[in-house]
């Protein structure tokens, strides 16, 4: 199931890259020349186009055409987003275009899709809100860290990290205790996914001081050697202390720091 979701995610991501690669990628609201077609005509035409299974080149063309209609395109884009009769990749594109045309004014509407039953729509909303640099939805991003989709959890983590939402650091730390962020190989022992590694680094980027002593303890235990590099990174970020370049000396360095914390 996870592999199928990942393949689907990679496919729809190709379309979002086209949206972000344009000179107008700021997501502050599209400034384009409005065409003379009526709103109803624009809606009818766009709905017909978004109904099709389009190639990558056709998606780029449709994106450019849609942007020329500016606000007139919004009713059609909203309908595409809301209806499962349209291809997922087109609904993904519609989500980005709403953010592109409306700018931050679209944030409250996009936030509603963070609870959508389709993971593609939840993912598209998170990515669009990140492009909008929307920092006022931290609580919604924190909830998404517990999403049933691994890929959505990963994107929610990226939103919190890139937007530097330090008040959500405790929620990020909580990801280390979510069993869904581990996998069971053939030997039956749970292994940490890359999401755990990213969560540990993010805790450091957010300078979550409450994680200092747990991380110092983890740094001394062999069972965490697979994430030692991330632990070392986060401890350096949180404490402001840089460990030695020699990997063999790092563990000894953090042991001394741990002792100093206990004696304070």
Image (cartoon, grey):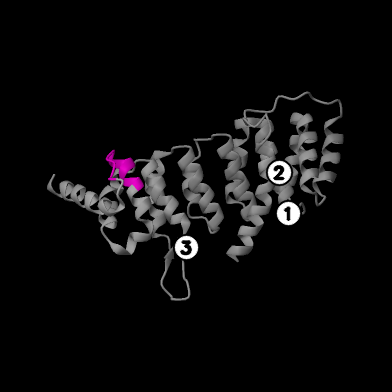
Depth check: give the residue in front, 129 or 26: 26
In space, the residues marked 2 and 3 are separated at their CA atoms by 29 Å
- Disc ID at residue 84: 1
Q: Residues within 10 Å of mark 2 (few under 14, many from 20)?
A: many
Q: Is residue 171 visible?
A: no
Q: In this picture, which residue range is highlighted in magenta?
A: 233-244
Give how far across and how far down residue 167 sits, in percent: 39, 40
Specify whether 115 is left or right of 40. Answer: left
**Helix, strand or loop for disc 3:** helix
Tell me which residue sits at (28%, 45%) in the image. Answer: 243
Specify whether 124 is left or right of 230. Answer: right
**Marks 1 and 3, the one that precedes in the sequence:** 1
Residue 242 is inside the magenta segment: yes
Q: Is residue 142 visible?
A: yes
Q: Which residue is mark 2?
A: 93
Q: Quadrant of the C terminus?
A: top left
- Residue 164, by quadrant, is top left
Tell me which residue sits at (53%, 59%) in the image. Answer: 148
- Disc ID at residue 180: 3
Residue 153 is inside the magenta segment: no
Q: Quadrant of the N terminus?
A: bottom right
């Amino acid at each position: 199931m996870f592999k199928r979701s990942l393949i689907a995610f990679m496919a729809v991501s190709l379309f979002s890259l086209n949206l972000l690669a344009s000179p107008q990628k700021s997501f502050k609201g599209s400034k384009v020349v409005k065409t003379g077609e009526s709103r109803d005509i624009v809606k009818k035409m766009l709905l017909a186009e978004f109904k099709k299974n389009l190639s990558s080149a056709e998606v780029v063309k449709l994106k450019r055409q849609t942007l020329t209609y500016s606000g007139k395109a919004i009713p059609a884009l909203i309908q595409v987003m809301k209806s499962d009769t349209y291809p997922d990749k087109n609904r993904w594109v519609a989500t980005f275009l709403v953010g592109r045309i409306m700018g931050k004014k679209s944030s409250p509407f996009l936030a509603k899709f963070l609870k959508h039953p389709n993971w593609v729509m939840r993912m598209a909303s998170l990515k669009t809100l990140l492009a909008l640099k929307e920092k006022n939805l931290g609580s919604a991003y924190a909830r998404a860290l517990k999403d049933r989709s691994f890929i959505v959890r990963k994107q929610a983590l990226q939103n919190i990290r890139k937007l530097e939402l330090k008040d959500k650091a405790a929620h990020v730390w909580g990801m280390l205790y979510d069993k869904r962020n581990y996998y069971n190989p053939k030997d039956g022992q749970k292994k940490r996914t890359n999401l755990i590694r990213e969560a540990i680094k993010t805790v450091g980027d957010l300078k979550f001081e409450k994680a200092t002593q747990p991380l110092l303890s983890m740094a001394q235990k062999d069972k965490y050697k697979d994430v030692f590099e991330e632990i070392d990174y986060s401890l350096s970020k949180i404490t402001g202390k840089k460990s030695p370049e020699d990997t063999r000396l790092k563990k000894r360095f953090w042991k001394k720091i741990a002792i100093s914390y206990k004696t304070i």
